[in-house]
Image (cartoon, rainbow, N blue to C red):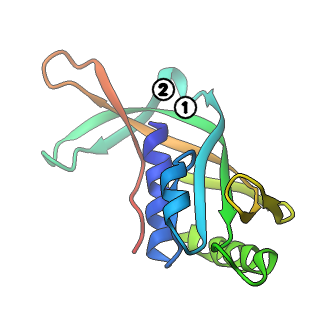
């Protein structure tokens, strides 16, 4: 479930021309020369999604048949940490430029990811990478639709509602 959220953000930022990876991938951070946004889940909290998870009726995209939909909601705090390009002349300015590009890019996120707030801190030197880093926090609510198994009808997966708009 949460991997879908991270992947949607990475794809959205990539479509806007920003380099983005899952956080904690130090190998990619070291090998990439340009600015990079590292995306992570910092906190996740499940929320009720209707009575018993019931969302109503919907049409199955594969079969075209009407069926009952169940789902889940999750309140998320995501990390969007911007690392300036290696050797950037003005690392803090580059972090700010990236932050300004992130804001409009996030409008293309899937409809199932509703942004509540986005905040960036001060760009500071990062001793481990030799770059400037600006830590960002994105608060959002993710809406997932449950996928049931064909045989027994038990939920086997939860899928982020919508898709990345290109």
Q: How far is mark 2 from mark 1, CA to CA?
A: 5 Å
Q: Please state, as top left, top right, bottom left or bottom right, where the C terminus lies in the image.
A: bottom left
Q: Position of residue 138 (x, y in %)?
A: 70, 53
Left or right of residue 3, residue 59 in this image: left
Callout 2 secondary element: helix
Left or right of residue 76, residue 121 in this image: right
Q: Which of the two residues, 35 or 87, is positioned nearer the viewer here?
A: 87
Callout 1 secondary element: loop
Residue that appears at 49% across and 63% down: 31
Provide the residue designation for mark 2. Answer: 53
Residue that appears at 66% across and 56% down: 80
Residue that appears at 59% across and 27% down: 48
| Image position of 66 with respect to 38: above or below | above
Tell me where residue 100 sits by quadrant. bottom right
Q: Are marks 2 and 1 in contact (CB under 8 Å)?
A: yes
Residue that appears at 59% across and 56% down: 38
| Image position of 137 with respect to 89: above or below | above
Provide the residue designation for mark 1. Answer: 49
Q: Position of residue 159 (x, y in %)?
A: 38, 41
């Amino acid at each position: 479930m949460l991997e879908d959220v991270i992947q949607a953000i990475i794809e959205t930022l990539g479509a806007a021309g920003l380099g983005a990876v899952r956080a904690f991938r130090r190998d990619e951070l070291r090998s990439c020369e340009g600015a990079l946004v590292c995306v992570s889940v910092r906190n996740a909290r499940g929320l009720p999604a209707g009575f018993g998870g019931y969302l109503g009726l919907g049409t199955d995209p594969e079969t075209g048949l009407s069926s009952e939909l169940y789902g889940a909601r999750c309140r998320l705090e995501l990390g969007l940490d911007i690392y300036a390009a290696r050797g950037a002349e003005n690392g803090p300015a580059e972090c700010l430029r990236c932050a300004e590009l992130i804001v409009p890019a996030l409008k293309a996120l899937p409809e199932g990811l509703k942004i509540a707030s986005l905040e960036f801190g001060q760009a500071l030197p990062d001793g481990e990478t030799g770059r400037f880093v600006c830590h960002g926090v994105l608060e959002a609510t993710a809406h997932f639709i449950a996928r049931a198994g064909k045989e027994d009808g038990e939920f086997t997966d939860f899928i982020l509602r919508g898709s990345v708009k290109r």
